[in-house]
Amino acid sequence: MLFEPARRTERGSHSMIGVLARFSARRPLLTIGLWVLALVVSLGLIDRLLDTATTTDFRLAGRYESEKASALLEDRLRGPKQLTELVVVQSPSLTVDDAAFRAKVESIAADVTALGPDKVTLLDHFYLTSNPVIVSLDRQTTILVFGMTGNADAATVNVEEVVHIVEEASAADDFRVLIGGDASVAYETNELALEDLEKGERFGVPVALIILLVLLGAVVATLLPLGLAAFAIVLATAGIAVIGQQFQLVFFVRLMVVMIGLAVGIDYSLLIVSRFKEELARGLDTFDAVVRAAATAGRTVVFSGATVVLALVGLLITPASFYQSLALGAIVVVIFALLGTLTLLPAALSLLGPRVDLLPIPFLARFSLKSPDVSQEGFWENVTRVVMRRPVISILLVGIPMLALSYFYLDIRTGLNDVNTFPDGAQAKEAFLLLEEKFSVGSVSPAGVLSPAEIVIDGDADDPQVAAAIGDLQRELFVNPAFPVPPTKTVNDAGDLTLLSLPFPGQPSSPEAADQVTVLREEIIPASFEGVPAEVHVGGLTAEVADFYGIVRFYTPIVFALVLGLSFIILMMVFRSIVIPLKAIIMNLLSVGATYGLLVLVFQKGIGIDLFGFQRAEVIDAWMPLFLFAVLFGLSMDYHVFLLSRIRERYDETGDNTEAVAYGLRSTAGIITGAALIMVVVFGAFATGRTVINQVMGFGLAIAVLLDATLVRSILVPASMEVLGARNWYLPPWMGWLPDLRVEAEDGH
């Protein structure tokens, strides 16, 4: 059991948390040595395994139709799908009929094919086949078609050399040369993600350092949280490198580990370090102060971490590698942050003792955290008194605007942002814009040709019924205005698998294209194949997108119910109340709802977008709302529990609800505000990235933590506590048998 009934600290110090703290404090050199050894091993694992642990290939569970189609094509027709790359060559003055244009194209073709067939093969160019389809109407633009060898991950690695050849060719003379395709898009996505990661670290870490200096008042104390976060991130990255050898993880997991690791690593250690300094100030010796800090603040940290993990477990049940990768990365780094907080940090503090305040910053001393019992006056005390004097008005003044913001969530338009949302100047984006301008056929763009719907018919192609059904389907698609380009037909050598490749109008990942897949699956195909001895599956990128949208729709209420239900049960046992968990859930949902509304207002409606420097987004990525809910619910519950545990303890001691609320807010204000501000800075740093995905995610996480740590904690919580009074702690008598998991935030001081 992670949380035992609240007792005196002497009893709590003998819990598992206390045992870990005692062992680490008594054997600090051994503990630190083991962590350093783990760090060295982790760096070696990262160097050898990380590149093969992540992928740009998003996969769904095998039971989904797009995955079935892909498996059939791979096993019985073409093997692993070969990714196609298009190199676009354009001249402002020459046409393909000019000798200089031909020399340019043939030079590029020679340079690329010189990389070898184990990396890339030339499939087509105008001077090879005289194919008019790959020349624009003005004859000033043409396309070279290359096939990347190997699977998606190998292609993403190998295409880097092709990209460099294209960049050199574009810089050489007046020709404009660009590259676009699945592999180059994946490569550029990786590059942009790493760029955003480095930018977030460069901005977030120094600002977090400044905030920690203000809160802790000394350089040595400040370096401890940053050091612990670094340990957690490195060990967690090694963990995903190992896990990824068996279950490949989406590359985005690396960004997730760093972002969440910085936030929770600094947050958790801040609680311990500040409590340790507080206990030293009360006169305890170093060893007892370490144990006391672990037995009190450490329990809050464990509960906080467990809450985050609990919320993220909901994403693990979602059968999409993207969700599972993000959840796994966050869970692993939270676990390592917890282990470091309960072992590495006590060991370091036991060695430092009072020297934790070495290298103080004198002019910051008056701002640093003080004991919560020092004074009953101050900013947060005054805020609490004002709020509790007019609690109903306070609730309305905050609750109504937050509900109004939540209303805009109803206008959300979800989809998947593609290469068109890459920052201006990104080569893949420029390539596809040029391709759409010069080579679109009606409503069908080159992207629709590159990523067609793949209708896979598993049945004997020579069977009269199957052959007739395939013919009916082809005729139906030919006359259907929704599909302006007819499908091409391919049959495998065994004659038992047929592929119809159907170019899609519009963008393959758009909601409209996904709707067309649904029409194909539920109306057009069944009409042709009813009673026919064959199974038909629709695959391809658009089908994968349609299946993913279906997963989000189906699993969102399940994840919400699971996370909210388990959170209610645990909070009920922690606070011995059914009112407190209901309020906590409502307030957290209010924060999440307001965040959703702000995402719509800023990114979709463009309000304030120039102020923040963000890109406009036609859609919010379909995975984002569920992901944000899981992460935000876990993080916001952290501060809620920390505050309410202090209030509950004081109420148990005095029976005075108003004074208990004021004390709880006063005693936690500094730590919660500082910890929340660090999270806001870390998440906000990633929102400064160039990709719209990181901007939406970073802004969403930052604004939700900010709302929760200010409006919710300082106004809604005390106001609602005042309105309900003693009813806050109501637990039906027949539920008295429930275990008491009370978090011991204080110990009787």
Image (tube, rainbow, N blue to C red):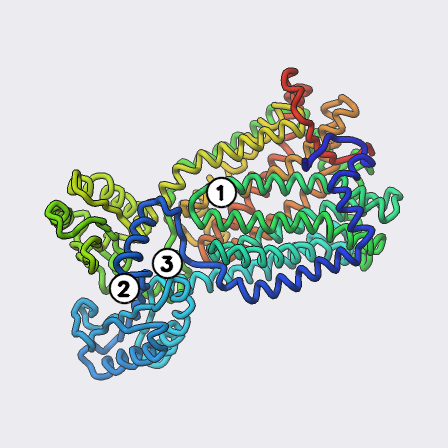
The local crowd at label 2, few if under 14, some if 14 to 19, many if 20 or more residues have their Cα within 10 Å, is: many
Residue 158: image location, x then y, percent: 40, 70
Residue 315 - label: 1
Q: Which residue is disc 2 drawn over?
A: 435
> Please, is residue 528 above or below residue 195 in the view?
above
Classify mark 1: helix, strand or loop. Answer: helix
> Please, is residue 94 above or below residue 604 in the view?
below
Q: Give whichever of discs 1 and 3 has the lower sequence position.
A: 1
In the picture as drawn, the residue positioned furthest to the top comes out as 733
Image quarter in which the N terminus is found: top right
Residue 668: image location, x then y, percent: 72, 38
Q: Give whichever of discs 3 and 2 has the lower sequence position.
A: 3
Labelled pair 1, 3 in contact (Cβ < 8 Å): no
Residue at 16% from the left image edge and 69% from the top image edge: 132
Residue 729 - label: none
Labelled pair 2, 1 in contact (Cβ < 8 Å): no
Image quarter in which the C terminus is found: top right
Classify mark 3: helix, strand or loop. Answer: helix
From the viewer's side, name the closer residue of 732 and 277. Answer: 732
Q: Give whichever of discs 2 and 1 has the lower sequence position.
A: 1
Amino acid type assigned to the residue bearing label 3 in the image: Val
Task: Tell me where residue 633 sits by quadrant.
Answer: top right
Amino acid type assigned to the residue bearing label 1 in the image: Leu
Q: Which residue is disc 3 drawn over?
A: 419
For marks 2 and 1, give the one nearer the viewer. Answer: 1
Residue at 74% from the left image edge and 36% from the top image edge: 745
Classify mark 2: helix, strand or loop. Answer: helix
Residue 542: image location, x then y, percent: 30, 50
> Please, is residue 649 above or below residue 418 in the view?
above
Residue 256: image location, x then y, percent: 54, 53
